[in-house]
Image (cartoon, helix red, strand yellow):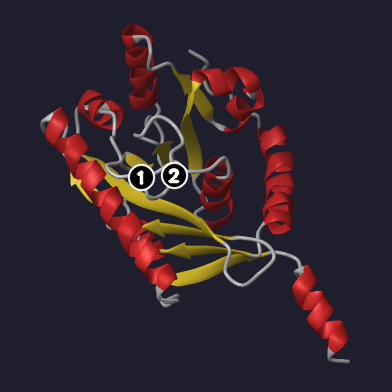
Amino acid sequence: MIEAKKNAAFRAIFSWYNTRLLRKHFFKVHLGGLENVRQLDRTRPIIFIGNHSCWWDGLIEYHLATEVLDADIYLMMEERQMVRYKFFRWLGAFSVRRESPRAAVQSMQYAASLFDAPNRFLWIYPQGEMKPNDVRPLDFFPGAARIVQMMGRTVQVVPFAHRYEFLMEQRPEAFTFFGKPMFVDHTQDVRETTEQFEHAVTGLLDTLRCNIVNSDMSSFKTILKGSTSTNNKYDAVRTK
């Protein structure tokens, strides 16, 4: 496996670049459920589990963790992707190879070992690959539940949902929704825990879709605004 090898100088440069990249490609980035993360005990293990529908997911999460939540982020990533983009290891990504049971166990053991310091967030996509938002069932793999089992203690698990939409603007808007933390004991059955995780994320995805369809933004805070869209520039000139 490819282990994370964080580089402070690279992270500083990348954080600046990533923010500019998000501003360039999105009209707005929205976050809901922030209060659910604020209540976490950062001295104890914290794992985030959610859907994986887009290449932007990891970059959104990196921005949230570093610029909004002020946390030390680690991210499990497919090994074939890590081989192509090895620089992600300097940001906290490490690889997993699901096709090999022995390699997968090694990655899970590595993930469980990361919580030897406070304020660390581990982000996992239990689907194992990118799938459209509305695919059902989500078909979670048991890796996240096995990592909890390996830790030998109660773990705080936060479900989250991503969605990207074009809402009357030239560029899309990104939504991330954090659910209520689950306190998962290491003695729980892996299959039941995996089902619990999948049910929680499915519910968040359905709620997020419903909120967007009904234009209900009351649960969300805009955490990043992009530059003015072409249509807005045109309207500004036209009304002068």
How far apart marks 1 and 2 lie (CA) works out to 6 Å
Residue under label 2, please give it. Answer: 132
Q: Nearer the viewer, residue 151 or 88?
A: 88
Circle 2 residues within 10 Å: few <14, some 14–19, many ≥20 = few
Any part of residue 6 in sight: no
Q: Nearer the viewer, residue 158 or 43?
A: 158
Asked if the residue under mark 2 is in contact with the one under mark 1, i.e. CB atoms within 8 Å, the reply is yes
Q: Residue at x 32, y 63 (%)?
A: 207
Q: What is the x, y in percent for residue 129?
A: 43, 31
Image mark for residue 135 = 1
Q: Nearer the viewer, residue 77 or 240?
A: 240
Q: Residue at x 49, y 46 (%)?
A: 71
Quadrant in the rendering for residue 9: top right
Q: Is residue 157 above or below residue 223?
A: above
Q: What is the x, y in percent for residue 18?
A: 68, 47
The amino acid type, in three-letter code, at marker 1 is Val
Circle 1 residues within 10 Å: few <14, some 14–19, many ≥20 = few
Q: Residue at x 56, y 23 (%)?
A: 81
Task: Give SS at disc 1.
Answer: loop
Task: Give SS at disc 2.
Answer: loop
Q: Is residue 207 left or right of residue 164?
A: left
Any part of residue 182 in sight: yes
Q: What is the x, y in percent for residue 208?
A: 38, 62
For the C terminus, the image quarter is bottom right
Quadrant in the rendering for residue 147: top left
Q: What is the x, y in percent for residue 142?
A: 25, 28
The amino acid type, in three-letter code, at marker 2 is Pro
